[in-house]
Structures are given as structure tokens and as C-alpha cells.
Image: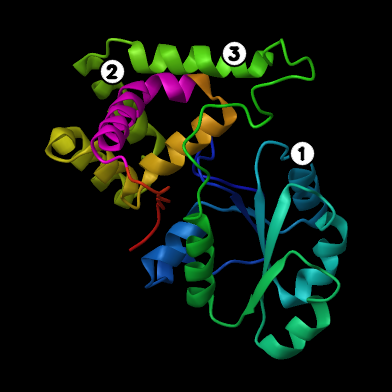
Amino acid sequence: MSAHTLTRRNFDNFTIVWFGDVPNTENLVDSQLQRLINSSKVFNNAKKCVNYIRHANNDSIALVVSNSLTEKILPHVHRFPQLTSVYIISSNVLSTSEKYSVTYSKIKGVFSDTLVLTKEIRAAETVTTPISISSSNGALSEDLDTLDPSFMYSQLLKEILFEFDYKEENHRQFVEFCRKYYATDDNQLSVIDEFDHNYKNHSPAWWYTRECFLYKMLNKALRTHDIDILCKMGFFARDLHQQLKELHESNKPDKPVTLYRGQG
């Protein structure tokens, strides 16, 4: 089987690479496992898998591999910084864990049950980066009198996104983009229909904290400065920013408050 994916872009926190045979999705009862496999890039050829991970410079990679194929792939990819986690499928969890865990620090676990594996990966996927358009390099360059160009770019982008006069047409165009993008994902299509017809019935924060495509798409677009997606989602980013700003102004605490986005 050659590499395949049902999407042209990846909006998740990491790309799931599955090396080896995967369960037949037509016979799967668990919908989460089915969606996990359908959204993964699957390889049976070790060389192609290594090359894909090597050149995935803009994505974090989570590798799923069976115990019998671990030695065939892991020594060649473990050093790559873009590979952040490894999940091994094995019928003998204890011996496999003892065999590899010391040598390969990126192994997150060994699983005999693919359903447990799915829940573990999905749990890791909900750990998102903060909503930020700021450069990760900071605002100041070595010359303290000079602003970092990337910081100035971030500030300009922020002003454009939040000050633009969005119309209903922007909402419609984003919804149509999402329907095409998730054309094969019935679960996301259902959420998109809700978003289309009931957006104003809920707050932007409610939509953002919902377990769906919105927070993944927005977070990654902000993190990577994906102008195309940011323009498509500009109305939502502005609404969310405005709500959070209003909440902050009306509820200024005496002490710092930490907020988390995740599953309840």
C-alpha cells in the first residue's frame, strides 16, 4: 500500500504516520479508530516512510508501528526532531516495552489493544498550543532598539485580522471550504452543518472548545502563519478574540488565572 491521506493539508497538532498493515476500516466497530486510520498517512515501504518523516519539516510526527516492524523503521527515524512520539502495537506489552523503552526515548507506550491506542493518541492530540499570533522568537532582536521583523509581521497580521469588516459572505465561504476539505468525514460534516446554521446560537469560545476541526485548524494556522486559512477563519478569530477580551475586562482577577482547552 502506498501512502495515502484523505486531506490535502494537516490541521492536527501532529501527523499520524502508520507503518505496516492497518485494520480493515470497513469492519471496524469503533468510529474513533476508524477516523484515526483514515486521517493517517499509511506506509508499507520502509524507505518511503523514512523519506516522508525526514522531509516533514513543518509537522510533528506521531509514528504507529507494530512490534515486528519496529527494528525496521525506528533506528532510521528516531533521531529526526520532527518525530515527537512513537506508539508500538504488540501482543506482549511488557517484553516489548523492556526491549525498546531504554533505547528509544520517544516511545510513549506499547499497546495490545488498538482501541486503547486510539484513546491515548486522541488524548495527546488535545494538548494544544496557546492561541497566539506572536513570533516564538520574541519581540526583541539583539539590538534592543530594533523590533524583530517577525514580531512586526505578527502585529500587522493581528491588526488586519481583528479590524477587518467581515460579512456573512466570509462565513459562507469558510463553511464551503470546510465541506470540501472534510468531504469524506461524516462526523466533521455534521459539525460543519451545525456551525453553518447555528453559529450565532453559541459563543465563539463554546465553538472553539468543542472537540472538532475548529480549534485544530485555527491553532495551526496561527502557529504557522498560514495566511490562506487565517483569512478564511478571520471572522471566527476576531469573534473569539473579542469575547475573550470582554471576559478579561469584566473579570479581572486579583491573581493570575490559567485557562485550559481540553476534553471535559
Q: Amino acid at mark 1?
A: His
Q: Which mark is residue 189?
A: none
Q: Nearer the viewer, mark 3 or mark 2?
A: 3
Foreground of the two, 134 or 226:
134
Query: Which residue is at 42% across, 11% downward?
Result: 160
Q: Is residue 162 above or below residue 119?
A: above
Pick whichever of labels 2 and 1 is earlier in the sequence: 1
CA gap between label 2 and label 1 equals 34 Å
Query: Which residue is at 56% across, 27% downward?
Result: 134
Main SS class of the magenta portion in the image: helix
Q: Is residue 100 above or below residue 222?
A: below
Q: Amino acid at mark 2?
A: Asn
Give the magenta range.
Answer: 228-252
Regarding residue 8, the answer to whether it shows in the image is no
Location of residue 84 by image quarter: bottom right
Query: Which residue is at 31% across, 40% downward?
Result: 252
Query: Which residue is at 56% across, 53% downward?
Result: 40
Q: Residues within 10 Å of mark 1 (few under 14, many from 20)?
A: few
Location of residue 55 by image quarter: top right
Left or right placement of residue 176 versus residue 11 in this view: left
Q: Quadrant of the C terminus?
A: bottom left
Q: Position of residue 70 (x, y in %)?
A: 78, 70
Location of residue 103 by image quarter: bottom right
Q: Which mark is residue 152?
A: 3
Regarding residue 86, the answer to whether it shows in the image is yes
Q: Position of residue 140 (x, y in %)?
A: 69, 21
CA gap between label 1 and label 3 equals 29 Å
State the residue position of label 2.
170
State the residue position of label 1.
55
